[in-house]
Image (cartoon, grey):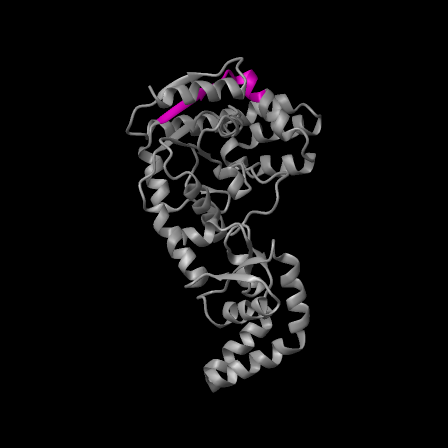
Amino acid sequence: MNAFLENSAALIDVRSPAEFEQGHIPGASNLPLFSNEERCLIGTTHKQLGSYAATQLGLELVGPRLGKLAENIKGVATEGNLRIYCWRGGMRSGSVGWLAKTIGLEVQLLDGGYKRFRNWALALFEQQWPLQILGGGTGSGKTEVLQAIAQKGGAMVDLEALASHRGSSFGALGLPAQPSSEHFENCLAICLHKQQGKSVIWLEAESAQVGRCRIPNGIWKQMQTAPLVLLERPTPERISLLVEVYGRQEIEGLIEATQRLSRRLGPQRTAIAVANIRDGNLEAACAEILDYYDRYYIKELQKRQMGFKRIAGEGKTAETIAEMLMQLEGA
């Protein structure tokens, strides 16, 4: 698996668009041999009439478009090299691999296909990782600190970036649609794989789900017992950071996200926050909403069985805090 993943050649997934959408190896392009409907039809034919009839149907469907498929393959290939996979490394990848070789490309097929990759990814989550968790109240700037750690050569995994969600009622605002949980796992597996051998890997403290993406159980359990560092900032700084992140979002989106919290905020506080958003006073709205998030955060922190360190972030840039955290690694 490592040799296949670390090859720099272009990566092609020849499964149907629906299979690809559900989850694929990160970095792959989808050049489906069959459409969703064709794949379903071939499966039905195989079940009712057997393998030979299904193979014949597949040949009839693909035959007229072999020329276009070859053109697309040629366009994707880098320096005449190509990696190809299907579900189990069977007929689909083998057929497209034959076509690629026919037009002069060097091809590497993934033995066992995407199914093998998924097993590899799931096994990766059960390994022990040197995780270090960065916690802190909403608006502490934890994500920016993680990004600064990466820029300074440290190891980190940005779960929120992988999930395309910031992990709150407001978390999806201004971001692309979330991946499936399966594809989130695939991206996480690749990130962890790249960090193998590191002495410390930083992650942000998260709930078990980041939006609709669930953190794999093996990693989630390790996060609960990993060393925790709390980044502490005064409330005015946190409000300023939140307004910087969310202030560019549409007002209606902010209001909808606030109203989703109404059962927890209470009707009076929700109404005040919404009125402030409509008036453009996002600082005041943040102050109302932060009270709920802080109470929830303190409650969750009290459940933690292990101790933690604190780091003062007041007046400090993300880069400075990143340096402080990286110094803690060897302490």
Q: Nearer the viewer, residue 155 or 82?
A: 82
Question: Residue most toward the top?
Answer: 315
Which quadrant would the N terminus be assigned to in this image? bottom left
Which quadrant would the C terminus be assigned to in this image? top left
Question: Residue most toward the front?
Answer: 104
- The image shows residue 106 at horizontal and vertical percentages of 54, 61
Residue 99 picture quarter = bottom right
194 horizontally vs 260: left or right: left
190 horizontally vs 11: left or right: left
- The image shows residue 110 at horizontal and vertical percentages of 45, 61
Number of numbered labels in the structure image: 0
Residue lying at 60% horizontally and 65% vertically, measured from the top left:
104
| Chain part drawn in magenta | 228-239
318 horizontally vs 249: left or right: left
Residue lying at 56% horizontally and 78% vertically, measured from the top left:
58
Q: Is residue 46 magenta?
A: no
- The image shows residue 234 at horizontal and vertical percentages of 51, 15
Q: Nearer the viewer, residue 270 or 307?
A: 307
